Structure formats: C-alpha cells, structure tokens
Image (spheres, helix red, strand yellow):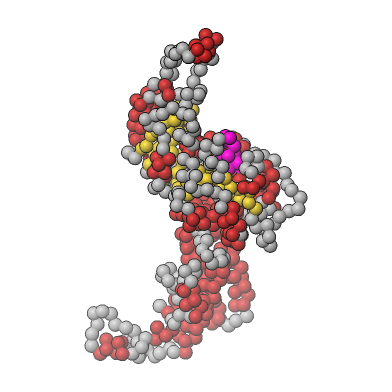
C-alpha cells in the first residue's frame, strides 16, 4: 500500500524522516509524497532524508509562538532532558489549543504545501505525530479535518503516546487527541512509549516502529518479486483497518542459516546450469510458532488481543519457506487467540531474503489498559485545574460575604452549592467530548464555568428576594392559602380548573436569563441546567 507520509510536531517529523529513509531510494512506500510540518524550526536541523522543500514551518509570525534566535542542538531522541527543554522553549509550548489556532491561521500555507502531495499516486495518507505535544495534538487535528475534506482515500494516524514519567499536561493532551482523532480517522495506530522506551533509546524506538510500518504497508510493493497465490494487496490492509478504532502491530523474524555459494555453485549459475534447490528450513510447525511469537511479542500498543475485530497476517521470506500449510496453521492459531474469523493472510516472497518474518495487524482493539490509564490521569489533571479555579472564586466570594448580613451569608451558601454542581457538570462534558476544533475560536473551559456560576448566582438572588416578599399565611391544615400549585393528572374539579386558568408563580420565578438563552444558541456551550444535574433549589 502506497502511503503519503505527513509528519507533525517534533516526534512526527523525526519518525517520518526515519520512515522515509527506511523505504529506500526506490520510495516503495511513499513514492516521494512526504511532508513535515512543525512550529519548532530546530527539529528540521536534524532531518536527514526529507527534502527542505517538503519542510513546512507554521506559526513563525504568531505572537504567542516562541521562536528563539540561537538554534538549539537537541542531539538525539535518546536525550530526554534536552528534548524536554526544547519542547518548553520553542513552538506552542505544549498547548494543543494554541497549536490548533496556529494551524487554522496558517491553513492557506498548509494547503499550498499539500499541493505537492499527489493523492492519485498513493492508496492512503498517514499523519504521524506525537500526541502529547501541543503541535502534534493540535495541528494534527486540524490537518486531519483538512485532509478528510479534500481526499477520497483513507486517512490513518500513527500517534506516539507519552510515557508515564512525562508531564500530566502531555498525558492530558494525548488523551484528548485520542478522543478527537479516533472518530475522524479511518484508523489510529498508537505507539506506546511507556513500553518501548523502557530499555531502548528514542532512536531505537523510531527504528523499530519504521521496520513494522514498512513491513506492513510496504508488503508487495517492491518490484521484481516472484508471483504468489497469496500475495498481499492494498485492499487487504484497507479492509482490515476499515472498522476504525485503535489498531496495533506485532512483528517477529527468524534468521535462516544460509551457506555461501562455493566456486562450483557460482560457475553453475554463470553457465545457467540449474542447481538443486536447498531444502526448506521452516515447516508448518515452525510457521505456527513464528506467528505465535508475533502476536505475543511487544505490540506497538499492548492490548487484550481477543478484543480485535479483524486480523491481518503477512509472511515474508524466501518462497521455499512460505508454504500454504504454514499459512493455514498460522490462521488457525490466530482464530483461537483472537476469537474472530475475519482473518486475512498474504505473503511476500523474496528470493534475496535471509530471514522469515511474520507481521500481524490487529484492528479495532478495545481492551487497552494504557489508554484507560491516560484517560484517568487526564481527568485528574483537568479536575485539578477546575478545582483550583473554583477555589480562587470561592475565596473571592468569602471575602465579600464577610461584609454582608446573615441573610446574604445564607444566600452565599446556596451559591456555593450551585458552584460545585456547575463545576462537576462542566468537567463531565469536557471528559465526554474532549477537544472540539470547530470553525469558531476554541472556548476556554474555565470561561464556561465562570459564566455558568454568574448565571446561577443572579438567578438565586432574584428568586430569594421574590420568596421573601411573597410569603403567604398558612391555615390550620398546614397548606398555604392561595397556593397556585398545579394538581396531578388524577385531580379534577375546581382545583384543576383554577390551575389551568391561573398562571404559575413558579414559571415566573424561573424565567430564563438572557445570558442563558445566548448560551443555548451556541452549540459549543452547555447549559448547566439542561440535563438536570444542576438545579435552582429556590425554583423547585
């Protein structure tokens, strides 16, 4: 399958550069359709394989994007501390909303750069990004929207997840990116740095990821390979990924014992004399064990493999080592381990290969502990930010209430209850939907909370004044005289007629303020009283 490779952010540019180098001078994967987009100029200094004309710097004129005068040599990916310094100093400083705003502002420049990508030469496009960064998260979301609007080919995302020792901000950005990208992309293939960077340098991780991507998407793209009945086709890959969601890749290879040709063998080949074919070193049992090792190996995203919807198996190696019986045993093993019958298999016979490799693609996996951990960590981070903002507001309210009467203090207590309800409701919506990069400017969640608190406070104050001035006498039966309470469905008679003819005081007291009406008109702002989780106690 031919792919247009689009690297976004520091990690994305480095990984695409490595992928572009791994596909070789023939460009068997991309046909030269490569693009690197970043808000950090120093990352381009380390690029080795991407042409300078395909490097796009955005945000360089934006007032909030920092571009230092001296270039910083960030060394290799293995130097975490130095990479973190660059991330803090340059670009959007880890702010995904700023990244999205910069991408929208420079969208005309991005469109001009996309003109160099010939989508007629490729079968799909792939955005490669570090999801924990502000550029990787924010810019890739805008770029994905743009590609979906102009391309008819599938669009995949290869996203790098931050490790556990990285900041809460990066974990929060990655969790939001997953929520944003998964519904929009045709497939998302995360790479978990928590697993891969434990004992490996970033350079080694990039090498391992590039090997798996080329082995999967580059299968069958090399010229001069012998024909095969089970040769891979781009449609096999697109069909496996068509279910969407999160996907993961397993990969393993076993080296063959290849004895060098002696002078007699070389002479026979030179004279065209047919030499005997060496015996195969792998049988059906060996292939089965190879497939088992691949599916049990270190996956790009560790998961419960039994939750996969579809599976793709690719075997590559010398033709004599790839038997049909081996394929059948491998497929049977995958059916037992994954519990699905939607398994496609293909091979890539290579007469020059010195090893047999097995690549397994598991699509739409759902039981992923790492993603759940990121979401919980992101929710705790978001809750902490909201609680801090609420605490500041509560302190200000307390200072004012000290100067008021006892009646105003009671009202302040009610306001505090509404503040808690509104804050919880806002957190729930942010966790449910994540980022919404709409055509409008991004809305600050703290502004939503403050607006909701102000609306609730004004409504409570007006309702309290109305109740105090309209207290009614109570008769001996304990019922309020002149009560306008509406009867239930089973009540009839004069009381029912009076309830139908007289207007309800409750409807007058809970008249919707103008601000709340404006909020209801805006789809990006949620009314805190719409779902019933936050209510006006006085109006009940």
- Above or below residue 151? Residue 365 is above
What is the magenta segment's predominant secondary structure? Answer: helix
Q: Position of residue 509 (x, y in %)?
A: 43, 84
Q: Is residue 485 left or right of residue 297?
A: left
Q: Which sits in the foreground, 453 or 142? A: 142
Instruction: Give the image quarter of residue 450.
Output: bottom right
Residue at figure coordinates x 54%, y 75% from the top left = 454
Q: How many marks?
A: 0
Residue at figure coordinates x 56%, y 69% from the top left = 447
Was residue 120 drawn as part of the magenta stretch in this picture? no
Q: Position of residue 103 (x, y in %)?
A: 59, 58
Residue at figure coordinates x 49%, y 44% from the top left = 122
**Residue 198 visible in the shown view:** no
Residue at figure coordinates x 41%, y 25% from the top left = 322
Residue at the extreme top: 264
- Above or below residue 429? Residue 134 is above
**Residue 236 visible in the shown view:** yes
Q: Is residue 111 left or right of residue 350?
A: right
- Above or below residue 58? Residue 424 is below
The region drawn magenta spans 14-25
Residue at the extreme right: 70
Q: Is residue 482 left or right of residue 394?
A: left
Q: Position of residue 131 (x, y in %)?
A: 55, 50
Q: Which sits in the foreground, 380 or 152? A: 152
Q: Which sits in the foreground, 248 or 303? A: 248
- Above or below residue 345? Residue 425 is below
């Amino acid at each position: 399958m031919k792919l247009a490779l689009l690297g976004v952010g520091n990690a994305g540019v480095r990984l695409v550069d490595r992928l572009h180098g791994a596909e070789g001078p023939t460009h068997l994967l991309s046909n030269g359709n490569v693009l690197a987009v970043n808000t950090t100029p120093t990352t381009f200094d380390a690029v080795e394989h991407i042409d300078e004309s395909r490097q796009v710097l955005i945000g360089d004129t934006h007032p909030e994007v920092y571009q230092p005068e001296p270039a910083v040599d960030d060394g290799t990916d293995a130097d975490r501390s130095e990479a973190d310094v660059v991330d803090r100093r340059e670009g959007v400083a880890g702010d995904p909303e700023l990244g999205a705003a910069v991408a929208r502002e420079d969208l005309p420049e991005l469109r001009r750069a996309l003109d160099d990508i010939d989508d007629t030469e490729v079968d799909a496009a792939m955005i490669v990004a570090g999801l924990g960064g502000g550029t990787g998260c924010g810019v890739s979301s805008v770029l994905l929207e743009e590609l979906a609007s102009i391309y008819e080919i599938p669009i995949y995302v290869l996203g790098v997840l931050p490790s556990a020792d990285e900041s809460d901000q990066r974990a929060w950005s990655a969790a939001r990116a997953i929520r944003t990208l998964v519904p929009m992309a045709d497939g998302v293939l995360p790479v978990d740095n928590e697993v891969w960077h434990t004992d490996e340098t970033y350079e080694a991780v990039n090498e391992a990821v590039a090997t798996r991507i080329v082995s999967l998407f580059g299968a069958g793209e090399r010229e001069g390979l012998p024909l095969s009945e089970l040769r891979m086709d781009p449609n096999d890959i697109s069909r496996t990924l068509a279910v969407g969601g999160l996907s993961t890749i397993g990969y393993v290879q076993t080296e063959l014992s290849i004895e060098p040709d002696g002078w007699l063998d070389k002479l026979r080949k030179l004279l065209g004399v047919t030499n005997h074919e060496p015996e195969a070193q792998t049988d059906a049992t060996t292939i089965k064990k190879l497939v088992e090792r691949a599916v049990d190996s270190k996956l790009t995203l560790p998961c419960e493999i039994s939750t996969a919807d579809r599976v793709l198996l690719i075997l590559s190696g010398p033709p004599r080592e790839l038997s049909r019986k081996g394929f059948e045993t491998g497929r049977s093993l995958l059916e037992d381990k994954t519990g699905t019958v939607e398994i496609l298999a293909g091979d890539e016979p290579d007469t020059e290969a010195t090893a047999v490799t097995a690549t397994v693609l598991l699509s739409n996996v759902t039981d992923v502990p790492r993603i759940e951990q990121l979401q919980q960590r992101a929710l705790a981070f978001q809750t902490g930010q909201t609680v801090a903002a609420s605490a500041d507001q509560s302190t200000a309210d307390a200072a004012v209430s000290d100067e008021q009467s006892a009646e105003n203090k009671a009202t302040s207590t009610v306001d505090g209850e509404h503040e808690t309800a509104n804050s919880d409701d806002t957190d729930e919506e942010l966790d449910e939907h994540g980022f919404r990069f709409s055509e409008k400017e991004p809305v600050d969640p703290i502004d939503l909370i403050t607006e909701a608190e102000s609306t609730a406070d004004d409504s409570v104050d007006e309702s309290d004044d109305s109740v105090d001035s309209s207290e009614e006498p109570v008769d001996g039966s304990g019922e309020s005289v002149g009560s306008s309470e509406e009867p239930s469905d089973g009540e009839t008679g004069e009381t029912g007629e009076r309830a139908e003819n007289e207007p309800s005081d409750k409807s007058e007291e809970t008249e919707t303020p103008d601000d709340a009406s404006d909020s209801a008109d805006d789809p990006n702002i949620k009314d805190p009283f719409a779902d019933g989780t936050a209510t006006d106690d006085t109006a009940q």
